[in-house]
Amino acid sequence: MNNTCPDCDECLSIPDDTEKGEILSCPSCGLELEVIAIKDGCIDLQELTIEGEDWGE
């Protein structure tokens, strides 16, 4: 399966056994992407966001 990086438009080669929730990295720009859905052979990717802890500041 193929998809494109939302940041640099690099073509991403995605393994057929990829599952929802997996983290993929763009080989060109290094952006980390999370697989959010797989429907009919199409994969929806979203930029991985890591939320920091709120220490009450």
Image (tube, rainbow, N blue to C red):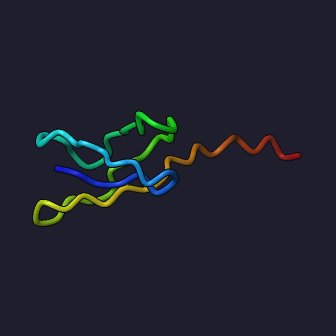
Q: Is residue 36 left or right of residue 6?
A: left
Q: Is residue 15 left or right of residue 33?
A: left
Question: At x 21% / y 45%, what residue is drawn?
Answer: 19
Nearest to the observer: residue 53 or residue 48: 48
Q: Is residue 2 above or below residue 17?
A: below
Nearest to the observer: residue 53 or residue 47: 47
What percent of the width, then of the height, locates residue 46? 43, 56
Q: Residue furthest right?
A: 57
Q: Is residue 30 above or below residue 12?
A: above
Question: At x 31% / y 40%, what residue is drawn?
Answer: 22
What percent of the width, then of the height, locates residue 14? 23, 43
What percent of the width, then of the height, locates residue 41? 12, 60
Question: At x 24% / y 58%, what residue is drawn?
Answer: 43
Q: Is residue 17 above or below residue 3?
A: above
Q: Is residue 21 left or right of residue 7?
A: left
Q: Is residue 9 left or right of residue 44?
A: right
